Each structure stands twice: as structure tokens, then as C-alpha cells.
Image (cartoon, rainbow, N blue to C red):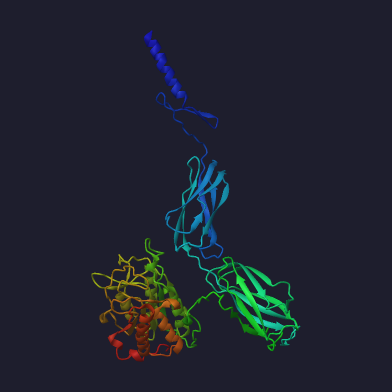
Amino acid sequence: MKNIYLVFFISFFWIAGFSQTKQVISGKSAYKPVKAGKVVVVKKVKEVPDLIIKEEVFEDPNRSNLIDGNEKSAIRFKIENIGTGAAKYVTVNVSLKNKMIKGLEFRTTIVVGQINPAEIKEVLIPIQGKIDIEKGLAEFKIEVREEQGFDAFPLEMKIETHPFEPPHVIVADAVFSTENGGKLKLNNPMQVKFVVQNIGNGDATDITILCALPNGDCVLTGESDKFTIDHLSKGESKELEFLFVATRRYTMKEIPIRISVTEKFAKYGQDTTVKVSLDQELLAQSKVVIGAIPTVGEQVQKVSLSSAVDKNIPFISAVNNKKFALIIGNEDYAKYQTGLQTEMNVVFARNDASVFKEYVVRVLGFPEENVYLLQDATTGEMNQKIDLISKLATKTGAEAELLFYYAGHGLPDEKTHTSYLIPVDVSGTNLYSAIKLADIYKKFSETGCKRITVLLDACFSGGGRESGLLASRSILIKPSEEIISGNMVVFSATKGDQSAMPYRSEKHGLFTYYLLKKLQETSGNISYGNLADYLTKKVSLESLKINQKEQDPEVNVSKLVNDVWASWMLNN
């Protein structure tokens, strides 16, 4: 009898434990035997959701593809359920893989809710670049999570961040006129048309302009003395018109009108006073232009957007179809190499290359279609274009001319002392993929060109314009005469253990600035010898004045042209 009770007791608890694992899903029961006293819930689904992310885009108002300081932007994408079951309680989680970027705000969690089969829902992730944002690369990780675990594959998006660049809103020009022209007279209505322009690098918003007459003897005749402009992007301008009359009680010889300009931050506008004399001969329809006079003590210093050598570039009509050029400006190494600081970049190298290209085409007679410009070039891009212009020159024959310009990092191999040009995707600690300078010289000399000119705004000491890729290295490596052959002349920005320095106020490398300056002054009508003398003396002197460091350019010449190169002319 005891055994019968024991069997009954064990069976009761086994059945009780089994019954607790029962879960109703879609009207049916699911069972799984477990040990007594333990409860396990088993999920069972017949129809499975399948989420995908598609049509992802980055949206920014100025279309720079950057998260700029003081700019609202967004990542927009769609979530589609291509499965057969409903996706329940879908959320979007946003995080940064690199969390050290300052001045960046964004939504970290967005609730999407249920997404039924074949349904598509759009998601917008607002991003705010604050005014203190730093230059960097924001690596967003976007995860679409589903309550039951049916998540989408994560989306990763890398977007560059850019520091806030202020606007600078000024009155660029002003014009006084009357309806019928003639001399300005009292009691005779007149108007001043003026142009408000943003000459800063950043966008200006919420701009207010107030026109103030000198005293009560000048009266407003137009609709308003206040104007508003919602937005002015860099370089953008807007023309405005202010109407007034000076009564016969007005006693001064000039009528000054003060134009006050403010914008969103109340610090990047410039007050200006424009004046007209009572005996000024005015024409109808605003024909007389009077330059604006900044109000003393209240002006914001005008920002120079470009160097003098970037403008007024001479134009020489003669073009030689047998001239070929490759121009490279490698500036942004930090963008392509994780862990590099922006100080490792070669400041103004892109500007050096782009402006030099204009001189090559306009002043030196190279056909534009024969000139190849690379900015922030990788190893593959550099090798491809070096090979291309070498082949073009070779097929053109003995009358071909070849020019190679490079601004960027150079480095020596510590063991062999071999010089390399460094593409933006090559680390200073591993020169395996760097481009050996001797190989470039050899390839160019084998073309048989009648003239090969190499210009290097780079150093090979391990230093650079701001900081070298390996700042501790200061090995002097310069091309030896043995590796320069053919009809080749090489102009280098430095010698010894010096660094190629910037000219900050002109936004160029120091060597390139004076190269461009001399081309501008002479329209290219200068010999190689005179150019070499000028660069050697000018750059050496100005480097000490501007950067307090020595920088002495030098020229290396092939033995084949040792007696004739100095008489070569740049523009023929």
C-alpha cells in the first residue's frame, strides 16, 4: 500500500510541473517536459518578421555633407518588414562608436512601434552640431531592435564633423540716386541702394538691417527703415533700397546714413556709414557707386577669403598640346588614418595644388585636358596618374614636356635613407605602400621628354607644415644626383633637416606662395635660373620672418642638362 501512495505522490508532482510549462500561442498549446518545480516558457511563432534598413541618407541644410557647427542635420532612412509576421515594439538605438567627439547632440532612442508585413516606416534622427563642435569623424551605429529579437542588421554611417565657422555680414557697396538725376538738392527725394553681403565662411541667419538718418531734418519716404534677411550663405548678397528726403532745414554739406547690421549671434555683423555730398552729381537709376565707409570703432575685422596670388592670375593665350602635368595636394591624412591628429595634416596643400593648376593652365600654356589634379590622393590614385602621364608623354614623343607638382608629406626610410612621397592612406610607420621618389624620377626620365620639371613643396626629414607623420624623426634624405636623369630639374622646398612651412595669412605653403607670386608678377616670362635664385633668397628670408625657422629651397639638376637648364623659360 505504501508503494501505491508513493507512485501516486510522484505522479502528481510530475504532472503539476509539466502543466506549468503550457503556453498558449495562436490558440494552440506548446509542451516541454521539465524537472519538477522548474518553469520554462517556450516561444513559438508561425509567422516571422524580417526587418531591413534601406534608403539611408544624410541631410544637411547647406549640402556640405558635413555636420557643421551650429547646424541642424539629420539621418533619414526607412525600415521595411519583408517577413510574414508583424514586428512588435520596434525601437531605433543610436550610438557613437567613437564617443569623444565634442559638441554633437542626437536622439539616442526612437520608438517606431509595430511594423506589419510589407509595411515601411520612415525614421528621422535629428543631429545638432553645436557651436563648440570639433573637427573629426562621427561613426554612428544605428540598431533597429524588435521586441521578440528579430532585429535588423545594424547600420553604420561615418560623417565628418566640421567646426563652427562664423559669418561676416557687411555692406559691400552703396549707390545714391534720384529719380531724374542731376545734382542732389534739398527737398528732392532720393534713394540709396546698398548690397548686404556675407563675406565670412559660415552661413548667416536672422539678419536685421537698420538705416539711421542723421537728424530730424532728414525724413523717411519709403515704407520702412528696417529690413530683414532670413539667410545668407558664404558669398551671398542681397540688394536693398532705402528712400528718404533732406528738407531745406538741413544744414550739413554731407548726408551720412548709418547702416547697422546684426545677425543671429549679434557679433558677426558690421555697422557701416555711407555718405553723399549735397553737391554730388547724381544720375538716375543708380549709376553712381560710392564705396561704403566702415563706422570707426564698431567694425568687425574683415576676413580675407583668399590670397592675392589666388586672384588676378595672368592669361597667356599660347597653348602647347604637347605639355602634360600632374598636380597633387595631399592635406587631410587624419581623415584616412584612424588615430592621427589633425596636426599631422599638411595645411593648405589642397589650396596649393588647386591654385597652382590655374597657373599651369593660364600662365604656362598647358591645355586643361592635359592637366590632372589630385587632392588627398591615395596610393592607387597616385600610382595610376603617374603611370598615365608618363605614358601620354612617351607616346607624344621627344617634343613632349612633363611637369609634376606635389604638396604633402614626404618621409625617409630609416634604414635605407630612401625618400618617399606619402599618400593620404599610408602610415608613417609603414612605408610599404608609399611611393618611392626615385621610382617616379626613373619613370619620368624614361619618357624621353625634352623637359621634365618637378616641384616639391614637401620635406623628407619626417617633419611637416604643422607636425610630421613622425615628428621625432629628423633624418635628412634628399634625392641624389644619381637618381635624377634625363632632361630633369627638381625644385625642392627645403634642404637639410628643415621642414616645409606654411604661410598662414596667405593660406599657402611658403614655397608655393612665392612660386605663384613670381609667376603672377612675370606672367611666366622668367628663366628657371632666375626663378631658382628668387625662391632661394625669398623663401629663406621670409621663413625666418614669418615662422622663425630656417627653410632654404634648393634645385637638383640632371647632368644631362646641367649647362642649359638655367636658360629654360617657364612659359615656352
- Camera sees residue 214: yes
Q: Is residue 381 left or right of residue 279?
A: left
Looking at the image, which residue is at 44% across and 30% down? 40
Looking at the image, which residue is at 75% across and 82% down? 247
From the top left corner, tell me how far across and down residue 464 is, in percent.
Answer: 35, 72
From the top left corner, tell me how far across and down residue 474 is, in percent.
Answer: 28, 72
From the top left corner, tell me how far across and down residue 87 is, in percent.
Answer: 53, 42
In the image, farthest residue toward the top: 1
In the image, farthest residue toward the left: 415
Q: On the image, which quarter does residue 412 sit in?
A: bottom left
The answer to whether 102 is drawn above or below residue 484 in the figure is above
Q: Closer to the camera, 363 or 235?
A: 235
- Camera sees residue 285: no
From the top left corner, tell me how far across and down residue 418 is, in percent.
Answer: 27, 73
Q: Closer to the camera, 72 or 370?
A: 72
Q: Closer to the camera, 303 or 417?
A: 303
